[in-house]
C-alpha cells in the first residue's frame, strides 16, 4: 500500500483521540498514489490542484547520522533503489543533513511523552490498567519531562522544518528520498517496527509519502515488501503527490533488482 502523511494540520484532527497534539497527524493509506491524491483532495479543505510535472524531480538524499539505523537489508535495498533511479535519468544529490539527528530524535520522543502524559492524565489515573504496556510506559516517562523541556522540544519542530526546507531550496531540489524503515517488516504482530526513519519528517511536520519499492533480498531472510519514502516542503502536499505519481512506477523495482 501507499502511505501519506500530510503537512501538519492540513487534515483536521477533530474527533481524534490525541497522543501528542504537537506532532499528531491524520494520514491516508491506499493502493496507489492516485487513490491517495483523490482522498487527499477531499480530506484537505484547502486542496489546490497540482498539474502533473513535466520534468523529472531533482531528488535530495539526506546523508549523515540519519542513515545509521539501516539494517544490512535496508542498506542494500536503498543502494539498488538509488541505482535504478539514476539509470532512469533522475538527478540524485547527496545533502549533508541533520548532523544532530540523535538530538532531534530525543527531542521528538521527549515531546511525545510529555504531551501524552498531559493529554491522558485523567484517563490514565482512572483506567491505567487498560492501557497497553508501551503506552503506559510512555506516559510514565512523560511525567518526568519539565514544562520548559517540553516547550524547547516543541519549538524545535519549526527550527527543523526551516532547516529541511532551506536545504532543498539551497540545493535547488524538489524533494527528499529516504528509506521508510530500517529494513523488512518485523516478524509477528507485536510491533509495527522502528519508526526512526519517519521521525524527522513527523517532527518537522512536512509531508511524506511512502510507496512500494520491490522486495527484500532472499539472503537476508523472508522475502518481504520494501518501500521508498519521499518528503517535500511544508505545505507542498499537492506537489509531493504529483511527484509521487510520476515516480511510482520507477520506484517499483522489478524482482531482479532485489533478488540475490
Image (cartoon, rainbow, N blue to C red):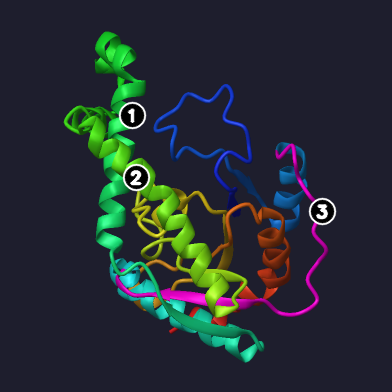
Give the quadrant of residue 172. Answer: bottom right
> Which residue is found at the position 58% from the left and 69% from the top?
175
Give the foreground label among 2 and 3.
3
Mark 1 Cα-neighbour bin, 10 Å: few <14, some 14–19, many ≥20: many
Q: Viewed as shown, does residue 101 lie left or right of 204?
A: left
Q: For the N terminus, give its image quadrant.
A: bottom right
Quote the CA–CA distance across marks 3 and 1. Answer: 36 Å
In what element is the residue under mark 3?
A: loop
Q: Earlier in the sequence, mark 2 or mark 3?
A: 3
Is any atom of residue 252 visible in this view? no
Q: Secondary structure at mark 2?
A: loop
The residue that mark 2 highlights is 191
Q: Residue at x 59, y 88 (%)?
A: 86
Residue 149 versus residue 157 in the image, above or below: above
Q: Which residue is mark 1?
A: 116
Q: Answer few, some or many: residues within 10 Å of disc 2's Cα (few below 14, many 20 plus, some between 14 and 19).
A: few
Q: Secondary structure at mark 1?
A: helix
Q: Say which residue appears at 36% left-offset and 64% top-offset.
A: 182
Q: Which residue is mark 3?
A: 49
Q: Which of 28/236 is in front? A: 236
Amino acid at each position: 500500500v501507499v502511505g501519506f502523511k500530510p503537512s501538519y494540520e492540513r487534515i483536521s484532527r477533530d474527533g481524534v483521540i490525541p497522543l501528542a497534539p504537537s506532532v499528531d497527524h491524520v494520514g491516508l493509506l491506499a493502493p496507489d498514489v492516485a487513490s491517495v491524491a483523490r482522498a487527499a483532495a477531499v480530506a484537505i479543505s484547502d486542496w489546490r490542484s497540482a498539474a502533473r510535472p513535466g520534468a523529472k524531480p531533482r531528488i535530495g538524499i539526506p546523508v549523515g547520522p540519519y542513515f545509521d539505523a539501516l539494517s544490512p537489508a535496508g542498506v542494500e535495498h536503498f543502494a539498488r533503489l538509488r541505482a535504478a533511479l539514476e539509470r532512469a535519468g533522475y538527478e540524485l544529490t547527496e545533502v549533508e543533513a541533520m548532523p544532530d539527528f540523535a538530538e532531534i530524535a530525543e527531542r521528538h520522543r521527549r515531546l511525545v511523552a510529555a504531551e501524552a502524559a498531559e493529554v491522558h492524565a485523567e484517563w490514565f489515573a482512572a483506567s491505567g490498567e487498560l492501557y497497553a504496556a508501551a503506552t503506559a510506559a510512555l506516559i510514565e516517562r512523560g511525567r518526568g519531562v519539565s514544562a520548559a523541556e517540553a516547550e524547547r522540544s516543541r519549538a524545535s519542530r519549526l527550527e527543523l522544518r526551516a532547516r529541511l526546507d532551506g536545504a532543498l531550496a539551497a540545493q535547488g531540489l524538489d524533494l527528499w528520498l529516504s528509506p521508510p524503515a530500517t529494513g523488512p517488516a518485523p516478524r509477528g504482530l507485536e510491533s509495527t517496527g522502528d519508526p526512526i526513519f519517519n521521525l524527522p519528517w513527523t517532527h518537522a511536520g512536512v509531508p511524506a509519502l511512502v510507496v512500494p519499492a520491490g522486495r527484500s533480498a532472499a539472503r537476508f531472510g523472508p522475502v518481504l515488501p520494501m518501500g521508498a519514502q519521499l518528503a517535500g516542503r511544508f505545505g507542498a502536499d499537492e506537489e509531493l503527490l504529483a511527484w509521487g505519481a510520476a515516480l511510482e512506477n520507477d520506484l517499483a523495482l522489478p524482482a531482479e533488482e532485489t533478488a540475490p
